C-alpha cells in the first residue's frame, strides 16, 4: 500500500463533529446537517481541512446512531439526503472535505436485513446459533420466528454482521468461513454503501470498530485481508477518497489497507498517557498512571514515544496515525482539575508532531467534560460515562449558548451550566484565547510543511520540557506542567514562530508552566 490515494489527508487537520450537539437549525433541540452547513465559515476561519461526522444515518438511536437502520438514508432528525449533498457542496466551496462514519460490523436490530434474517432459517447475514455452549454476554435470544440466539457486537440492539470466522469449527456451526455466502454478501454491501456516498461527494469514511468484523481472528489476519481488498477497490474506483479506521493499532491497521488509524484511549497507552488525568470518562483502560499533561508534572512522554516508534517501524511511511484531542467516547482535554489555560501546550504538541491531528468540536475553545449528566441514547456504557463529552457546542452568550432556539428542556443534552463557560464568539474576539492559539498553530502547520506528517522527528530532551526537531530545521518545546522547566540547548535559534512562555538563549531553553514554543533553528 502507498499513501498516494490520500495525499490530501497527509496534509490535513480534521475536525470531529458529533451531529446532535453541534448546531440546531430548526429549533427542535437536536443538531442537524443544515446547522453544520451554516457554521462552515467558522471551520474555514479556524483552518481545518476536513470535517468528520459521527453517524448520521437512519437509526433507532439506542447507541447514539451507532445502531444503523438504513445506511443509504440520513436520519430524519438530521435532515435529508439533499441536505447531505448541500453540506458536501458548501464545504467543498470552502476547501473543506466531508467524511462520514460507517458502522461496518453491526446494524440495528430494526434494520431490514436483520428482520429478514431473524425470521428466515438459513439466512446468514448475521451470526446465528440454535444453542450456546455457555452463558456469554455476546449472545442474545432471538424473538423472531427463527428462534435461537444472535451474536451482538456491543449492545443487544446491535447484532453483528457475519463476516465469518478465521477459525471455523464443525462443532460450532455458526463459525462460518470468511468466504461463505453470508460473509460475501456483507462484503458486497460495504462496497455498495461506500460507493453510494462517494458518488455523492464525500471524501472518506471513518470505520467504526474496524477490527471487529472477522471473529476469532488471531493477529487480525483475515480482517486485514478483508480491508485490503476494500482498499484496492476504493483506490481503483475512488482514488481521491480515504479510509480511516477505529482500530487503535496503527501498526496493524495501516498495513491492512487503511490510510490512517487512530490512537485510541482504550487501546494501548498512547492517548491516555498524554491526556487522561483520571477525571471524566473512565474505563478498563485506566491504569492510574499520571499523564504527561499533568499539572503536577508526574507524567512521561515515554509511553507515547514507544507506541509511536512501533508505528513508524511497522508502516515505513505507508500511512498515518491519527491523534485526537478527545472524541465522543472519551473525556475532553479540559476535564476535572485541568482548565483551558493549561491546554495550549497540548495543542502545540498535537499540531506539530507528525500524526494526523483530529480536533473534537469545542475542544478548540476549551469546552469542558461536564460530569453528572443523565444517560442519553446509550451514552452510559458500563462504567463509561460518555455524555459529558457530548454537550452542545457553545457558540455565544445567547439562549442555549447559541446552539438552539428550543426550550432548554428539549435540548439533546444540557448546555454546560458553568457561568464561566467559553464560547466561540468570545474566544474569537480575544486574541489571547485558546481558540487563537489553535488557529495560529493550524496556520503554522499549513505554512511550514516540516511541521506536518512527512518530515522526520528527532527528540532532543524529555520530559519537562519536552523538545524535538522537525525536519532538522524547526524546534518545538512544550511544557505540560505548572512548574517552569529548563533544558540545555546547543542549537542556534534563528527566530521564534509561535511562542507562549518559552525562551531560548545562553545555551538553554526556559519554559514557563503550561507553555510552548516553535522556533526556526540554523541547520
Image (cartoon, grey):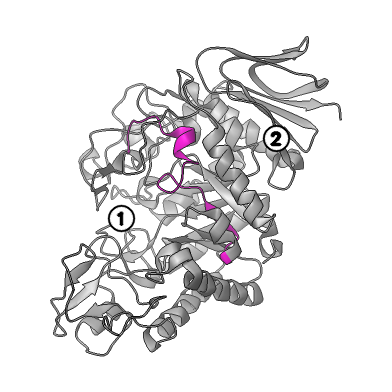
Residue 401, x across and y down, in percent: 36, 34
Q: Which residue is mark 2?
A: 444
Quick check: is 467 in the magenta stretch?
Answer: no
Chief secondary structure of the magenta span?
loop
| Left or right of residue 276: residue 97 | right
Residue 169, x across and y down, in percent: 32, 81
Residue 149, x across and y down, in percent: 18, 75
Quick check: is 259 in the magenta stretch?
Answer: yes
Query: Element type at marker 2?
Result: helix
Question: Is the residue marked by circle 1 packed among few (<14), some (14-19), or many (20+) residues within 10 Å?
Answer: many
Looking at the rendered structure, which numbered label has been put on residue 493? Answer: none
Residue 233, x across and y down, in percent: 60, 77
Q: Which residues lie in the magenta part?
A: 256-281
Q: Is residue 494 visible?
A: yes
Q: Quadrant of residue 507?
A: top right
Q: Which residue is mark 1?
A: 64
Image vertical order of residue 463 relative to residue 181, above or below: above
Residue in view at x 34 percent, y 60 percent? 66
Query: Element type at marker 1?
Result: loop
Q: Quadrant of the N terminus?
A: bottom right
Amino acid at each position: 500500500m502507498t499513501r498516494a490515494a490520500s495525499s490530501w489527508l497527509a496534509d490535513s487537520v480534521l475536525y470531529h463533529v458529533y451531529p446532535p450537539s453541534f448546531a440546531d437549525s430548526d429549533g427542535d433541540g437536536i443538531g442537524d446537517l443544515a446547522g453544520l452547513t451554516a457554521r462552515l465559515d467558522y471551520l474555514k476561519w479556524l483552518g481545518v481541512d476536513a470535517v468528520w461526522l459521527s453517524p448520521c444515518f437512519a437509526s433507532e438511536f439506542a447507541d447514539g446512531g451507532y445502531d444503523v437502520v438504513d445506511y443509504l438514508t440520513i436520519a430524519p432528525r438530521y435532515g435529508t439526503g439533499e441536505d447531505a449533498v448541500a453540506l458536501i457542496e458548501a464545504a467543498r466551496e470552502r476547501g473543506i472535505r466531508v467524511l462520514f462514519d460507517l458502522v461496518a460490523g453491526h446494524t440495528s436490530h430494526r434494520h431490514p436485513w436483520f428482520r429478514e434474517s431473524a425470521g428466515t432459517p438459513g439466512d446468514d447475514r448475521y451470526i446465528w446459533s440454535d444453542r450456546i455452549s455457555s452463558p456469554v454476554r455476546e449472545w442474545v435470544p432471538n424473538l423472531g420466528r427463527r428462534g435461537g440466539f444472535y451474536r451482538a457486537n456491543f449492545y443487544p440492539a446491535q447484532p453483528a454482521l457475519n463476516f465469518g470466522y478465521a477459525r471455523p469449527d464443525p462443532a460450532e456451526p455458526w463459525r462460518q468461513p470468511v468466504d461463505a455466502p453470508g460473509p460475501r454478501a456483507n462484503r458486497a454491501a460495504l462496497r455498495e454503501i461506500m460507493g453510494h456516498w462517494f458518488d455523492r461527494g464525500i471524501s472518506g469514511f471513518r470505520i467504526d470498530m474496524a477490527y471487529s468484523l472477522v471473529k476469532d481472528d488471531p493477529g487480525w489476519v483475515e480482517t486485514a485481508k478483508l480491508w485490503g481488498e476494500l482498499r484496492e477497490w476504493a483506490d481503483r474506483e475512488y482514488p481521491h477518497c480515504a479510509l480511516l479506521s477505529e482500530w487503535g493499532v496503527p501498526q496493524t491497521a495501516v498495513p491492512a489497507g487503511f490510510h490512517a488509524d487512530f490512537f485510541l484511549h482504550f487501546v494501548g497507552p498512547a492517548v491516555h498517557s498524554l491526556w487522561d488525568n483520571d477525571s471524566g470518562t473512565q474505563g478498563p483502560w485506566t491504569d492510574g498512571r499520571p499523564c504527561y499533561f499533568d499539572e503536577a508534572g508526574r507524567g512521561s512522554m515515554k509511553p507515547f514515544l514507544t507506541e509511536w516508534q512501533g508505528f513508524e517501524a511497522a508502516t515505513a511511511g505507508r500511512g498515518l496515525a491519527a491523534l485526537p484531542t478527545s472524541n465522543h467516547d472519551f473525556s475532553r482535554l479540559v476535564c476535572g482539575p485541568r482548565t483551558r489555560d493549561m491546554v495550549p501546550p497540548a495543542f502545540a504538541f498535537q499540531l506539530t508532531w507528525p500524526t494526523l491531528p483530529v480536533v473534537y468540536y469545542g475542544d478548540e475553545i476549551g469546552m469542558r467534560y461536564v460530569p453528572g449528566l443523565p444517560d442519553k441514547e446509550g451514552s452510559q456504557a458500563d462504567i463509561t460515562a460518555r455524555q459529558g463529552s457530548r454537550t452542545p457546542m457553545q457558540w455565544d452568550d445567547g439562549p442555549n449558548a447559541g446552539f438552539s432556539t428550543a426550550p432548554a428542556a428539549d435540548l439533546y443534552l444540557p448546555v454546560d451550566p458553568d457561568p464561566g463557560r467559553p464560547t466561540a464568539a468570545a474566544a474569537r474576539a480575544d486574541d489571547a484565547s485558546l481558540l487563537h492559539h489553535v488557529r495560529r498553530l493550524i496556520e503554522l502547520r499549513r505554512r511550514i510543511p516540516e511541521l506536518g506528517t512527512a518530515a522526520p522527528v528527532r527528540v532532543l530532551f524529555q520530559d519537562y520540557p519536552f523538545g524535538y526537531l522537525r525536519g532538522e530545521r524547526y524546534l518545538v518545546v512544550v511544557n505540560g506542567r505548572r512548574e517552569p522547566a529548563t533544558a540545555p540547548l546547543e542549537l542556534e535559534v534563528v527566530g521564534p514562530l509561535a511562542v507562549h512562555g518559552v525562551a531560548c538563549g545562553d545555551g538553554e531553553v526556559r519554559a514557563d508552566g503550561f507553555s510552548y514554543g516553535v522556533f526556526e533553528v540554523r541547520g
